[in-house]
Each structure stands twice: as C-alpha cells, then as structure tokens.
Image: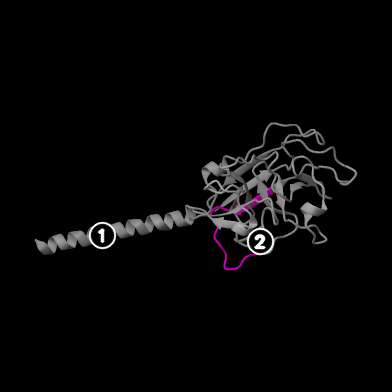
Amino acid sequence: MEELARRTIISKQVNMMLTYLFISVLLASNANGLTRKEIRRFKADTYTEQNTGLQGTVSVTTTQGTHTIVSNGIPDHATADYPTQRNPNNIIEQSYSFTVPKNPSVADQSTALNMGPIGIAVNGIPFYNPWTRENTDAVESETFDECDGHPDGRGRYHYHKMPSSCVFNIRDGIASTIIGVALDGFPIYGPIDEDGTELTSADLDDCHGKVSSDGSYRYHTTEDFPYILGCYRGTVNN
C-alpha cells in the first residue's frame, strides 16, 4: 500500500510538472505578440482629411504565423494645409501592407533602424526613425503640424515622435495603451508605465523598450530622443 501511495504521489507530481511546462511554453510562445485586445485598437476614426478629401483606413489580417496590417496612409485627424512654406510635399494616398510576426522573439543582436517606415500606428500611419537624411535629430530639425506628423517627398504622412496630441492622450497616472507595432512585431506603447510613472529613455534599453510585468517585451514612446524606437530588438522580415 505504501508503495502504491508513493507511486500515486510521484505520478501526480510528474503530471503537474508536465502541465506547468506546457502552460509555460504556451505562454512564452505568445507572450510578445499582439493580443486580440491590442489588434482591436487598430482602426481609423471617421475623418475626411482636408488635403486629399479621403478618409483613413486600416485593417489587420492574422494568419497562423503573421499579422498583416493594410492601410491607405491617410491620417484620421487634422493636418496642416500641405504643401507649406517649410514642407513642399503633398499628402498622397498609399497602399501599405506590413507583415509582422505573430509571435516575435528577442534576437541575439539588435538591428539598426532603416529609413522610411519602422512601424505602424494604430490609425495606419507609419512611424519613422528619429533622424533626417542628414543624420540629424528630425524632431529638432524639421517642422510638424498640430498632430505631430508631416509628409515626406513621396507623399507619405508619418510620425518621427510621439503623436500624443491626436493619436492618444497622456493621462497622469494612467498606464498607456498600445499606439502601434514595430516591424519586428513587438507592440509600441505610450510613455506611462504600468505603475503610473512617466518613462524616459533612461528607463528603457537601447532599442527603447522594456519587459512588462507579464514578462512580455514592448517598446515605449517618450518625450526625449529617440522618441519611438532606437533599434529593432526582434527580427524584421519586411
């Protein structure tokens, strides 16, 4: 009887360990990817953009291993009357299709940011890196409209810095929600951390991200350089 009881206890312990291992692996495989709640945040407000007379569109399609974000690149908020004296470019409708991994993972080495889109905001407008083509701080060197964006030479309206004035609101002590996703698949959140404190670049790693309380990695925007991303922590396939 004692031997039977001992085997029963061991069997239960083994089953518990296997169950715990299975759950841990399952959570780890999905820990960094966009959640259903985050995906639902990708939508454009009903707003007719004054320069194009068009409305912004954005949608997310999920397959077994990827999310594909499709957007026409039209901002769903107020913009300047382009071209302006300091920005000779027009806003032109785009045909964006960004595919990001469903379950991104931290790479062995970070990857330098490219020029052009490095991520996509929840309203379908791309994020750019913090530099100009002359390798200067874009936020200090260039001009932006009241919603913190502007078009480039190809008519692509975009953000170099945290678009807090129109895409989301910073509320003191209230944790930020998702504002977009980087091309490596990691979500981008606003500057208010889970404990209600406002983050700066000093609180984040070189790529401008950190691990949240649930063990997932995410980027955070801040008021200081590099504003959105400093590098890619994951792998970019675009």
Residue interval drawn in magenta: 97-111
**Relative vertical location of residue 54 with respect to residue 189 in this rendering, above or below:** above
Of 110 and 202, nearer the camera is 202
Alpha-carbon neighbours of circle 1 within 10 Å: few (<14), some, or many (≥20)? Answer: few
Give residue 132's position: percent from left, percent from top: 80, 57
Please check the rendered image and state whether residue 210 is part of the magenta-colored stretch, yes or no.
no
Q: Which mark is residue 231?
A: 2
Q: What amino acid is found at the position of numbered circle 1 in the picture?
A: Gln
Of 176 and 133, nearer the camera is 176
Residue furthest bottom in the image: 108
- Residue 47 quadrant: top right
Q: Residue at x 65, y 64 (%)?
A: 111
State left or right for residue 216 relative to residue 124.
left
Give residue 8's position: percent from left, percent from top: 18, 59
State left or right for residue 58 relative to residue 148.
left
- Residue at label 1? 13
**Relative vertical location of residue 149 with respect to residue 109 in this rendering, above or below:** above
Camera-nearest label, 1 or 2: 2
Q: Residue at x 52, y 48 (%)?
A: 195
- What SS does tag 2 mark? loop
Residue furthest left in the image: 1
Q: CA distance from mark 1 to mark 2?
A: 44 Å
The answer to whether mark 1 and mark 2 are in CB contact below 8 A is: no
